[in-house]
Amino acid sequence: MSRAADRARGERAVFPLFAQAAGLPVREKSIRSRLVPEPDIRCTVNGEGALAFELGEVVNPPLAEMTHQSDVLRRRFAEAYAALPATKRVRIESSLGGRPAVFVAFSTPPGKWPQAILPILDLLVERAEQLVHGQEIRVWQIASLKGLALEMEVQRASSGRAGLYAVEMTEVVDRTLALLQKKFKRRYRTSAPIELVAYYISQPPPTRAGWLGEVTAFITSNLGPAPFRRVWLFDHFSHTIPLVWPPPYTAGQY
C-alpha cells in the first residue's frame, strides 16, 4: 500500500474520532474521502448541511518517517512470522509462553530496518528452546545482524500478535504553526464550507505555557484570506479538542 493510501486510510479513521470529541453531529454514512483539489473529507452535519474538512497531522518529519517505517516493519514481520511452518512457531511460543515481540535498537536508517526480519526469524527458530521472556540477545555475536542492530530483546507479546519494534529516539518538535502555514496557503475546489482539523496522533501536543495563545494569534491574523472558516486542534491521545477558532456559533450551528 502506498504512503498516500496509508495517509487517506488514517484520515478516514481519525475523522470520526475527531467528530465525536468535537461534538459534531456528523451523519456517519455521509463521510466520504475526497481527492485533490477537494479537501480530504466531505460529510453532512445535522443542522448544518454539507461540510468539507481538510485534515493535517502535526508531526515532526523525522518522527513521521520513523512512525511510517515502524508500521511497515511490524506488518512485514507479522506476515513473515505467520508464514513460518507451524512446528517452528510452536517451538518459539512454547518457550516464550506466547508469540514473540522483538525490540531492536537499529544501526541502520529506517528504510533498511526490514532487512533484519529474516535474520531475526532465523535466530528465533535456531534458539527456540532457549528463549525466555525479557531475554537480551547479544547481537554483536551474530554475523547475520552485523551492521543492522545494536541491541535486541525478546519478550512475550502482550498484544498476542507477533511484532518487531524499533527502539529509536527522535526529537519531538512542535510543528503546529508550520502545518497551519502550509495549509493556509493551499486552495481547494468544493461547494461546501471548509474547516481545518490539525490532529496529534504520532506525537502529543506541546505542554509549554502559552503555545495555545500563539496558535490562536496566528489563526486570528491569517484566517481571513485562508480557505477555511474555522480551525480545530484534535488531540488523539486524550480525545479532546485543545482549541477551536473561531468557536462555533451558539445558535443554529452544530
Image (cartoon, rainbow, N blue to C red):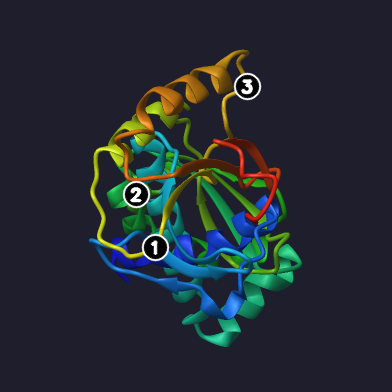
List x then y, in percent, for residue 154: 61, 52
Location of residue 95 (image quadrant): bottom right
List x then y, in percent, for residue 166: 48, 46
Residue at the extreme top = 209
* Residue 52 seen: yes
Say whether marks 3 and 2 touch (CB < 8 Å).
no
Location of residue 249 (image quadrant): top right
Q: 219 or 105: which is nearer to us?
A: 219
Q: Is residue 23 above or below residue 47?
A: above
Q: Secondary structure at mark 1?
A: loop
Q: Secondary structure at mark 3?
A: loop
Q: Amino acid at mark 2?
A: Ala
Q: Residue at x 48, y 66 (%)?
A: 12
* Residue with the mark numbered 3: 207
The nearer-to-camera label among 3 and 2 is 3
Q: Earlier in the sequence, mark 1 or mark 3?
A: 1
List x then y, in percent, for residue 153: 59, 46
The nearer-to-camera label among 1 and 3 is 1
Q: Is residue 160 left or right of residue 106?
A: right
Crowd rating for badge 2 (residues with CA inside 10 Å; few <14, some 14–19, many 20+): few
Q: Is residue 242 left or right of residue 169?
A: right
Q: Amino acid at mark 1?
A: Ala
Q: Residue at x 46, y 75 (%)?
A: 79
Q: Earlier in the sequence, mark 1 or mark 2?
A: 2
Q: Is residue 129 left or right of residue 52?
A: right
Give the alpha-carbon distance from disc 1 to disc 2, as whole Å.
59 Å
* Residue with the mark numbered 2: 143
Say whether marks 1 and 2 touch (CB < 8 Å).
no
Q: Amino acid at mark 3?
A: Thr
* Residue with the mark numbered 1: 192
Q: Secondary structure at mark 2?
A: helix
